[in-house]
Image (spheres, grey):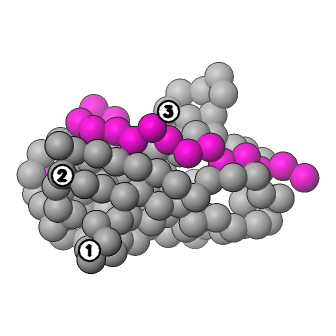
């Protein structure tokens, strides 16, 4: 059974950093990509970054430079490191599994079939 569990969110001051984790079970990162999405209050969900089964990464335009996605095969976990946090990064961050086996990841929610419950990131002084 597929499960995705995010952790690592919290309240952080502007300029701070967080590392979010997405623990995957029921499938292998060797075969499926993982994406990170976020949704701020009153806004549409947006893709932030993803990593394909091959390890190739993809970032939204405004995520480049401050966001880094990585994965640990041994732990079947994908991480999202966020540096220089800004108040506008405040959102619920969720990870999701790419629907199709070996398909390169893109930042379109329709390409994902299982989602975690999300972790809240709040950036405020």
Residue 111 in the magenta stretch? The answer is yes
Q: Is residue 31 above or below residue 109?
A: below
> Which residue sits at x=26%, y=74%?
73
Can residue 85 be seen here? The reply is yes
Find residue 76 and report its image quarter. bottom left
Which label lies toward us, 3 or 2? Answer: 2
Work out which quarter of the rendered image holds the N terminus and state it: top left
Disc 2 and disc 1: Cα gap in Å? 13 Å
Mark 3 vs mark 1: which is more N-terminal?
3
Q: Which mark is residue 26?
A: 2
Report the front residue among 103 and 1: 1
Residue 35: x, y in percent?
A: 36, 51
Q: Residues within 10 Å of mark 1 (few under 14, many from 20)?
A: few
Magenta residue span: 103-125
The residue furthest top is 42
Report the front residue among 13 and 109: 13
Answer with left or right where residue 107 lies relative to residue 63.
Answer: left
Residue 44 in the magenta stretch? The answer is no
The residue furthest front is 1
Report the front residue among 74 and 108: 74
Disc 3 and disc 1: Cα gap in Å? 27 Å
Which label lies toward us, 3 or 1? Answer: 1
Which label lies toward us, 2 or 1? Answer: 2
> Which residue sits at x=83%, y=59%?
13
Mark 2 vs mark 1: which is more N-terminal?
2
- Residue with the mark numbered 3: 45
> Which residue sits at x=84%, y=49%?
124
Residue 103: x, y in percent?
A: 14, 53
- Residue with the mark numbered 1: 73
Disc 3 and disc 2: Cα gap in Å? 25 Å
């Amino acid at each position: 059974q597929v499960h995705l569990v995010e952790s690592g969110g919290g309240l952080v001051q502007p300029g701070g950093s967080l590392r979010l984790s997405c623990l995957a079970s029921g499938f292998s990162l060797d075969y499926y990509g993982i994406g990170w999405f976020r949704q701020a209050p009153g806004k549409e969900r947006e893709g932030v970054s993803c990593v394909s089964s091959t390890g190739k990464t993809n970032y939204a335009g405004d995520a480049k430079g401050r966001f880094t996605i990585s994965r640990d095969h041994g732990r079947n976990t994908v991480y999202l490191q966020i540096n220089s946090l800004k108040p506008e990064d405040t959102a619920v961050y969720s990870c999701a599994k790419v629907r199709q086996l070996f398909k390169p990841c893109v930042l379109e929610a329709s390409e994902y079939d299982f989602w975690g419950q999300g972790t809240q990131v709040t950036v405020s002084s």
